[in-house]
Image (cartoon, coloured by chain):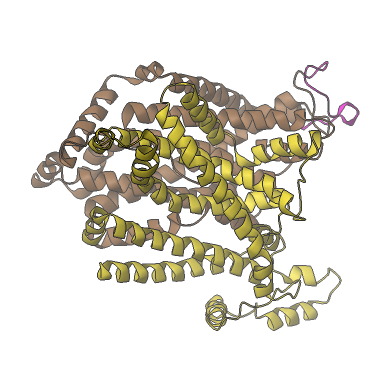
Chain colours: A brown, B yellow
Amino acid sequence: MTRDVTPAASEAVLTAQVLDATRRGPWRILKSRSATIGTVLVSVFVGLGVIGILLLLVPGLDATWKAQDLGNALQGPLSPGSPLGTDPNGRDLVARSVVAIGVSCVVAIAVTILSLVIGVVAGLVAGYYRGRIDTLIAGLIDVTWGFPIILLAIMFAGMMRPGFTSIILAVALLSWAGIARIIRGYALSLREREFVAAARALGIPGWRIIVTHLLPNVTAPILVLASYYIAVTIVIEAGLSFLGLGIQQPVPSLGQMLAEGRNFLRLSAWQTALPGGLLVMAVLGFNLLGDGLRDLLDPRLSRPQS
Amino acid sequence: MTRFVIRRLAYMAVIMVIASIIVFVSLRITPGDSTNFVITPVSSPERFEELRRELGLDRPLLEQYAKFVGRLMAGDLGKSDISHREVIEIVASGLPYTVALALAAAVLVYGLGIPLGVTAALRRNRWPDQLVTGLAVVGLGIPNFVLAILLIMIFGITLMILPVSGAAGFQNLILPAVVLAVEPLAITIRVVRSAVLDQLGQDYVRTLAAKGLTRGRIIWLHVLRNSLGPVISLAAVQFRSLLGYTLIVEVIFRWPGLGTQLVDAVLKRDYVVAQVLALLLTLVVIVVNTFADIAYAFADPKVRVRVASA
């Protein structure tokens, strides 16, 4: 980047760019090709997910994805009566895929909201107050951040009954740390700025400075991080369900459909191609959207690692 | 600098103790314990209580933890409650497989990632660049278990040229290593590409060219060496996610490493084995993180100052 200016000056330039980009409005994201593709993929995925959640929750509708017809099992796509075919138990794959997408959305959104709330609060408090509370939180971040998410999720699934709660808790319990790390960095640099010093001089209490002055300044990284973490969470949920440690039958999940289809690879590759393709679409969509948001809002952020 | 190293090591010790408590508690508070597998539904309640006493499962958690740590310190990793195998034996049998898999993946990641990244940077915005960066985007978008199934389908079922499970020989290593390598490879390519691009704009490149050095020497000797910093600092982060993914990839390909053993132990509620394996994997991650931090501080004085003042 700009190597011939001092760090402070390049920081100021970047911050100005960020503010500028935020002000020019959200539609600017459509200027970048990858972000446009990302937005389209994410919209399709989330739209299907909303229908899936309805099918999952509305009492009378569960027959669409639960009803078995063993005489009509393992049909390929475009077969009569079921446009996407049927699974090994003769259940309709359109309904099951849509519900599975809904499951992905529920888990991803719950995890992302939980870890964003914990991560942003911890990061802002640690970065703003410094001192002992910072040592404590930074230590906690280090312990959690070093822990492989999948390892903890497997332990949790063994501990409780595998399902929504164990996945959501296990992933949220670790992914807040990555968010807190980054937000703490922002808070550390923001607290030295004049407007924060001015607020402090006016006698505004710390918690109000955090809420009204720091929080609005970290919305850009929060948006970018949310997009990446949704992608990571979708993969982890699918991975756990694939191992049999996640969402349990009869509720479908993309990972579980993939594992089921694996037993029929020779008979019908379609059984794995469909959930696999949907997963790739979701991950690609959220990653591209995250990349687009990052380029637009804050080039300093990088993709998280699971 | 010495103070920084001592501090970082002390910190590592604290984190290790916390990690051991987390691993211990999380596996111990589970509903059901390993007696469920030894005792059948027709066993008498007295036999059940006796077994729990025998295994020490009726003692308070704190006492069990103290005993657990004491034994570990003495080098005694314990014995599986279920298979009665020594844990150290299980670790010894799984470790070579996990190390072999990780090494094979690392060879792929750096052996391919560095040349491809450099090539992409040198042919910026022309077809080699677009091809390589496009593949990197796809590599990041495919979850590794989806890729695993795809490769099983192509090489194991359609072409029938590679084995898809077990560990009979070198061929068994190919598919899991490729699956494990794809995501870090994609990230490495992107990092190398941007680091090389950053270096190519520096003044010293022009000076070396003016001095009459060939393009190849400038790039592979000077530019590449200066571009490796970000790759090395990324390696520590990648190590952590690689370790997590090893668990899934080993299970898919039935590769008898530590990951398969751990998932197995958790599913069977084989506490002793699960505890030791989870703790072992966690400790490895903590040690690697600590030494990466220290190495990084040696290499870059700016980090040293920042960490010391934090």
Which residue does the image show at 36% across and 46% down from the upper left? Answer: B225
- Return the x and y of residue B45 as percentages of the image width and height: 79, 77
Which residue does the image show at 45% across and 27% down from the upper left? Answer: A289
Which residue does the image show at 72% across and 74% down from the upper left? Answer: B81
Which quadrant of the figure has residue A223? top left
User: Quadrant of the image for the N terminus of chain B?
Assistant: bottom left
Residue at far right of view: A71
**B121 relative to B144, above or below:** above
Name the dominant secondary structure of the magenta segment: loop
Q: Is residue B91 left or right of residue B163?
A: left
Which residue does the image show at 41% across and 35% down from the upper left? Answer: B193
Residue at far front of view: B212
**A76 relative to B292, above or below:** above
Q: Is residue B14 left or right of residue B161?
A: left
Q: How many marks?
A: 0
**B3 relative to A211, above or below:** below
**B124 relative to B24, above or below:** above
Near-viewer residue (B241 or B99): B99
Q: Is residue B37 left or right of residue A36?
A: right
Which quadrant of the figure has residue B145? top right
Q: Is residue B276 shown in magenta?
A: no
- Return the x and y of residue B156 as percentages of the image width and height: 78, 40
- Return the x and y of residue A215 as percentages of the image width and height: 28, 39
Q: Which residues are magenta?
A: A66-82
Does any portion of residue B220 appear in the rendered image? Answer: yes
Q: Is residue A79 shown in magenta?
A: yes
Does any portion of residue A251 appear in the rendered image? Answer: no
